Amino acid sequence: MTLLLIQQIADTAKHLADTASHITQPITTQPEELRFGDLLIKGGWVMVPIGILAVLGLVIFFERYFTIRKASKNEANLMLQVRSSIHSGNLESAIALCRNNNSPLGRMLQKGLLRIGRPIKDIEGAIENVGKLEVSKLEKNIGILGIVAGIAPMFGFLGTIAGVIKIFYDISKTDNISMGVISGGLYVKMVTSAAGLMVGIVAYVCYHILNMMVDKVILSLETDAIEFIDLLEEPSK
């Protein structure tokens, strides 16, 4: 009987010890998942102008991209038709072809055809003026992309600096300089710098892509204009 009582006491003590060990065991918590959307919201008011710049940059890029791409299509067929009409002496047909083509090259050639009969220098000047006008139309709003590329990172740095100022202001009021308070507020404000740099880099790349496309169109127009002037000078050779 005594042995049975001792065994029960021992079992009870063991059970209490196991329970106590479970209670005193440290509780591990999973770190909070970092969500991209939450970071953008925590970035503060500076994320609003950065977002506006991002949308503006994308709208300008795609609008200009498709416009320039349309203007850069190969117009070799138009040159062949104009050459054929001039050789056959059908000037009106050549003018109609250029008018119906509705392209930068078509408008340049039309202006040159309307000046036939005048000195070559006058024809070259008229074509050059139309070419400058067409290029300026293609370059419309591209400069805004350059502005976006420049000021978007500045807005990002502004947000970070404003966040750091607020952190130290809160520390001065609460006299709490724990690493958790500093790092917790600082990593959120660094989001503005990352967002500003990202928008700036994308806008910078898009700006140079459009400029390269415009340069390609300019080279093509200059080549076709020289070919057209040579065509007009052929009878006098």
Image: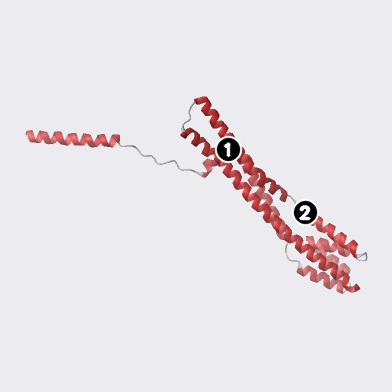
**Can residue 81 be spotted in the picture?**
yes
Q: Nearer the viewer, residue 161 or 85?
A: 161
- Across and down, in percent, residue 106 comes to 80, 63
Looking at the rendered image, the quarter that the C terminus falls into is bottom right
Label 2 crowd (10 A; few <14 / some 14-19 / many >=20): some
| Residue type for callout 2 | Lys
Q: Nearer the viewer, residue 6 or 95?
A: 6
Q: How many marks?
A: 2
Who's the residue at 68% across and 52% down the image?
207
Marks 2 and 1 close (CB-CB < 8 Å)? no
Judge left or right: residue 25 versus residue 4.
right
Say which element carries label 1: helix
**Residue labelled with disc 2:** 137
The residue mark sitting in front, 2 or 1, is: 1
Who's the residue at 88% across and 67% down the image?
92
Who's the residue at 50% across and 34% down the image?
182
- Across and down, in percent, residue 144 comes to 71, 47
**Quarter of the rendering containing residue 138:** bottom right
Q: Nearer the viewer, residue 117 or 216?
A: 216
